Amino acid sequence: MKAAKGTVFKYGDNVDTDVIIPARYLNSSDPAELATHCMEDIDASFVTKVQKGDIIVATKNFGCGSSREHAPIAIKASGVSCVIADTFARIFYRNAINIGLPIVECSEAAYAIQNGDTVEVDFDSGLITDVTTGQTFKGQAFPPFMQKIIAAEGLINYINAK
Amino acid sequence: MGMTMTQKILAAHAGLPSVEAGQLIEADLDLVLGNDITSPVAIKEMAKMHVEGVFDKDKIALVPDHFVPNKDIKSAEHCKCVREFACKHDITNYFEVGEMGIEHALLPEKGLTIAGDVIIGADSHTCTYGALGAFSTGVGSTDMAAGMATGKAWFKVPSAIKFNLVGKPSKWVSGKDVILHIIGMIGVDGALYKSMEFVGEGVANLSMDDRFTIANMAIEAGGKNGIFPVDDLTRAYMKEHSTREWVEYAADEDAVYDEEYTIDLASLRPTIAFPHLPENTKTIDEITEPIKIDQVVIGSCTNGRLDDLRIAAEIMKDKKIAKGIRCIVIPGTQKIYLQAMEEGLLRTFIEAGAVVSTPTCGPCLGGYMGVLAEGERCVSTTNRNFVGRMGHVNSEIYLASPAVAAASALTGVISAPKEEA
């Protein structure tokens, strides 16, 4: 089924929701507008470089902090096809699935993959391939219901379609 | 196998005799909460659902508090969206400016959160109500929408870490120092996905406001929830504020914990989290060089309650804030504001040279009412010191108790009150 492929933007531990989408922009809830400020306080050039399909890779506790769903919304609207991390903060994890942003926990991949690498993620098998280095990593496969939520672009559409 | 406090509450709300860590359950909700940032997204999502209305108009709380009173046109539009939704669905617990407060200070005061409840809120600091012996946790807007429509939410039953509190804290050590100490010890992901259960004879030496502060910051250790057992102090608080009947849960003797820590409250010192993570803690004694500051904020869902203002006022009484320092005091709710006025605390703050604001989350998340410029440093009683949280990406936040914040406002450098004071 679906796979993601793109260039990697690599970040470290504890990327919090305030740097993913600073609160000064939370007076908007429009995905396209939020996307124009995505990652602004950690990587000002992200929005000018990101291409549709690109992948974010980070290490521990990605998405910690506030419950703002605007964070995964901004990432998804910026064109990112998947976020890979060693661990995710729990509210971000839930929110990402609920809005249909694919996320994968994989410790090995999170530390080995470097900024700028081309990476491919197969959602059925959970297989992550670093095309640049040739390395492969076994991430968690997406269970069918989660793939359906992603295909439906979020939990609400998925529930409605049932 | 025995259950933790959290597991017992979740089992009861899932209609199950018992649950264990890792189990997926669907639980009935006693309250669904949202604010002016998260509710508009939830309202938009709920509109897509094929439902007539909300599951129970009495079990939803809508509290515009982040950018309220409206800070700009876009915020005003968000608030208008929440107001119209509340009106359309006749939401009982919608709080307009004038009767509002910072949500996590307001809801316990209104008696809407009591022991034994299961509460979700589209705000990460929803974990605050664990202070009363409830299971409460932060979620996103989509979960809030589903919760408002169905009155249910799914959870993965968490495992737990037990914090056995013993002893009595010294004069200027409060709940904030306890939780900063714990976060410094276990890290910002030390309790990831887990419950933090605070028990032991030392709990009796913590005021309700201390407990709210501690439970409030469970999320800053990655926790799913923080929770305290119910004691006489909790019962007195709930009797005073609520007419609902509560249910008390205590952990089983043979409950299983991933980790256990014992913390002697008497050994704790005023503790400060340095930029840019709440885990970067130092005690006041470990600060050897003076750290000059520009601003002090006393308030927020973490430390904007009456005890917090009393402590700050005791330190500022008949003193002056250091020249060039901006000190912003924000009572958590209208009721706290009024009590602080009647007790003369507001006079103390104003005479010391502080500014006192209507309740708002404003400065904590860099919204308004105290945004930082490049290179500025703030001592704040709030809960997060992430990069850019309170303003410019090159500003710095030092998280501390109301006592340290007030003392620092007087000296212009990070300070703690004198022991004998």
Image (tube, helix red, strand yellow):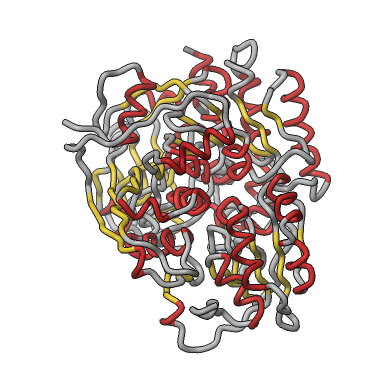
Indicate the quadrant containing the C terminus of chain B: top left, top right, bottom left or bottom right: bottom right
In this orientation, which residue lies closer to the viewer: B252 or A9?
B252
Residue B182 in the image: state x and y as whole percent: 37, 60
Image check: B142 left or right of B193? right
Indicate the quadrant containing the N terminus of chain B: top left, top right, bottom left or bottom right: top left
In this orientation, which residue lies closer to the viewer: B291 or A58?
B291
Above or below, B86 relative to A101: above
The residue that appears at 42% across and 58% down in the rendered structure is B179
Give residue B410's quadrant in the image.
bottom right
Residue B59 in the image: state x and y as whole percent: 58, 23
Residue A115 in the image: state x and y as whole percent: 42, 61
Residue A115 visible in the current orientation? no
In this orientation, which residue lies closer to the viewer: B208 or A104?
B208
The residue that appears at 53% across and 77% down in the rendered structure is B416
Image check: A94 left or right of A132? right
Residue B146 in the image: state x and y as whole percent: 53, 23
Give residue B183's quadrant in the image.
bottom left
Image check: A94 left or right of A157? left
Residue B342 visible in the current orientation? yes
The residue that appears at 49% across and 72% down in the rendered structure is B274
Which residue is situated farthest in the bottom direction here?
B289
Above or below, B369 relative to B96: below
